[in-house]
Amino acid sequence: MDRDDETSSTPPAPAAPARASRSRQLRLAALLLLLVVVVAATVRVVVATGPPTWDELRERAGLTNRDRLIIGVKDDQPGVAQKLENGAFEGFDIDIAYMIAEDLGFDAPEVTLLSIESEDRARRQARDADGSFVTVDLVVASYSITEQRRDQGVTFSFPYLETEQSVLTLASDPRQVASLRDLERAKVCTLGTSTSEQRLREAGANPIGRNRISQCIQALYDGEVDAVTTDAAILAGFVGPRPPGELPPATKLLRPKELRHWDIGAESAEKWGVNTGPVPEMRDLVNLSLQQSAKGPDGDRWKAAFDRYLASEQQYSNPQQVAVGRQPEPEETVEVRQWPWERWALPSPGRPRSGVPSAARAPSRRNRRSSGC
């Protein structure tokens, strides 16, 4: 047999393995295509029906293209919110304001704090350096959450502090104050728009309203009123001595006298909230910040602010509790959309933290207590 005959008689190689390989490749490609379709459909459903992302909340709240956040705060409440002679603010509310601002995407140099009066908190109107009224983005100003205020259109965040009503008198006053009834016929000063005024009337006292708590304290020093009442966390800052060498407050009180802080057995709690304005997404962003400070990995921020300012006042106010030493539980849960890799890679609430530069805050004040004078 010659070579040509031998070659022509060789049987062809089997084609079955090649066809099987191609079939497996086609099935794998089809499976991958199906997975892509399922994932794409799932993403569309989640995006369409799931909660918004943090960035979407910021956009809807009008913060995306903003380079400044304006917050209204009190300026005459030692330990809570006080303006110093150098123009800086300090206090528990101030630390909470910076904490929320940071979580909204604003570092301390991008935050403007403006003094706000009690009667202007509902309207979010504060005065700037020129004396003109400015609508602030948020109000963090010892603002008690009440149904009446909600009915009047105020939008509150979750509560961030729980305290109660209490009373201050001169330490030289012989009267014993165990309840508001013990102030019957007495002249008692309080903030004109506070929750305390109606309770005084019901107790038979003679309420005298003032726009600022520092005005009430001055009236008490001068003997124009017999007592002052409002939230314990506000009054506590006027009771203890102010350590020497600290920056003086911008609001100076004259002829200070020793004061006594009375526990009047108030049953109702005063819970402070942030007036976030009418935009729901701004409220959700603030609530998300408070939710994270209560239950997230940055919960030490609230505790640090409390210990720094309010817990240090307690020794001068016993037996009256200055405030509850834990953050109030959020009333509900704010959900934001995050993919698993975002939760793993980024800190809550889903954005990189740059921190609040300490130089941009008020000077450190540990183990302090201020009489506000």
Image (spheres, grey):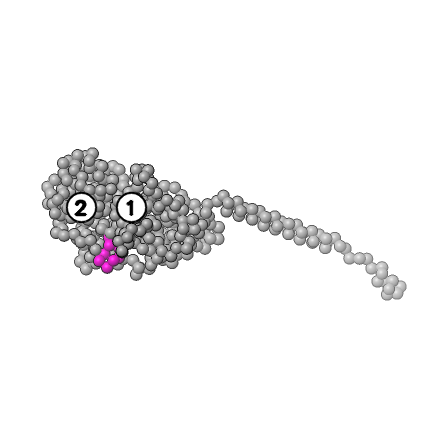
Residue 256 percent location from the top left of the image: 13, 51
107 within the magenta span = no
> Which-is-in-front pick, marks 2 and 1?
1
Q: Is residue 337 left or right of residue 254?
A: right
- The secondary structure that most of the magenta stretch takes on is loop
Q: Quadrant of residue 89?
A: bottom left
In percent of the image, x 33 and y 55: which residue is there? Answer: 111
Q: Is residue 363 visible?
A: yes
Vertical side of 360 occupied by 322: above or below: above
In the image, what residue occupies the spot 45% across and 55% down? Answer: 345
- The magenta stretch spans residue 89: yes
Question: What amino acid type is highlighted by mark number 2?
Answer: Cys
Residue 270 screen position, x and y as percent: 27, 41
Relative to 150, does residue 306 appear above or below in the rendering? below
Residue plotted at (23% across, 43% down): 231
Q: Is residue 295 among what the camera can see?
A: no
The magenta stretch is: 82-91
Amino acid at dot 1: Arg
Residue bearing mark 1? 121
